[in-house]
Image (cartoon, rainbow, N blue to C red):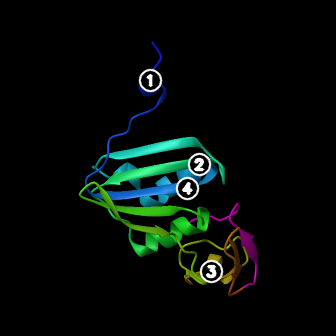
């Protein structure tokens, strides 16, 4: 007795909230950390290693009754520059956006150069974004270039 319903996973719709889709699977847990989902007391659905024609494997996050700040979306963009954000109101998608990697990043990522002034003194990190698709940053102080596979959150 194999029907179409038995082959599909059903996930309940959310009335109000946010859906973040097209997260590269390797970045999903970093996005979970950025949003501090473990501290939320609302319904959260997380999907991992779903098939994606564009990404190979992707993740998705559904969060009821919460809407990420622009700062959080900027952080997500560093690790998942192709992610899509859907805002849900009364069970309908009312807004659809791609995350945007900003031209400059301040205070979010740690410089990977241990000798950089930002790692020696209380100086806020500042980076210029060199590449937005495969996010690459250049430190404004020491000029160290770091790619998204080596970022560390501050």
User: Which element carries disc 2, helix, strand or loop?
Assistant: strand
User: Which range of residues does the magenta coloring cover?
Assistant: 142-154
Residue behind mark 2: 58
Q: Position of residue 142 (x, y in %)?
A: 74, 84
Instruction: Identify the residue at horizontal 45%, vertical 74% (top origin).
Output: 71
Pointer 4 with pointer 2, Cβ within 8 A? yes
Q: CA distance from mark 1 to mark 4?
A: 25 Å
Is residue 152 shown in magenta?
yes
Q: Position of residue 131 (x, y in %)?
A: 71, 76
Q: Position of residue 45 (x, y in %)?
A: 39, 44
Pointer 2 with pointer 1, Cβ within 8 A? no
The label number, if any, that marks residue 22 in the structure image? 4
Instruction: Identify the residue at horizontal 45%, vertical 44% (top origin).
Output: 46
Pointer 3 with pointer 2, Cβ within 8 A? no
Determine the image quadrant of residue 72: bottom left
Can you tell which of label 2 and label 1 is closer to the viewer? 1
Can you tell which of label 1 and label 4 is closer to the viewer? 1
Q: CA distance from mark 3 to mark 4?
A: 33 Å
Q: CA distance from mark 3 to mark 1?
A: 54 Å
User: Which element carries disc 3, helix, strand or loop?
Assistant: helix
Mark before the other along the chain sequence, 1 or 4: 1
The label number, if any, that marks residue 118 in the structure image? 3
Q: Quadrant of the C terminus?
A: bottom right
User: Which element carries disc 1, helix, strand or loop?
Assistant: helix
Q: CA distance from mark 4 to mark 2?
A: 6 Å
């Amino acid at each position: 007795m194999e029907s179409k319903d038995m082959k599909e996973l059903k996930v309940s719709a959310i009335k109000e909230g946010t859906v973040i889709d097209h997260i590269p699977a390797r970045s999903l847990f970093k996005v979970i950390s950025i949003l501090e989902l473990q501290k939320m007391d609302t319904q959260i659905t997380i999907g991992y290693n779903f098939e994606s024609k564009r990404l190979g494997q992707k993740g998705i996050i559904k969060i009821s009754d919460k809407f990420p700040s622009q700062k959080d979306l900027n952080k997500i963009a560093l690790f998942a520059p192709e992610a899509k954000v859907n805002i849900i109101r009364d069970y309908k998608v009312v807004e659809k956006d791609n995350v945007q990697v900003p031209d400059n990043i301040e205070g979010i990522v740690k410089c990977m150069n241990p000798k950089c002034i930002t790692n020696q003194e209380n100086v806020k990190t500042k980076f210029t974004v060199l590449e937005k698709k495969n996010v690459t940053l250049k430190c404004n102080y020491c000029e160290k270039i770091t790619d998204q596979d080596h970022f560390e959150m501050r």
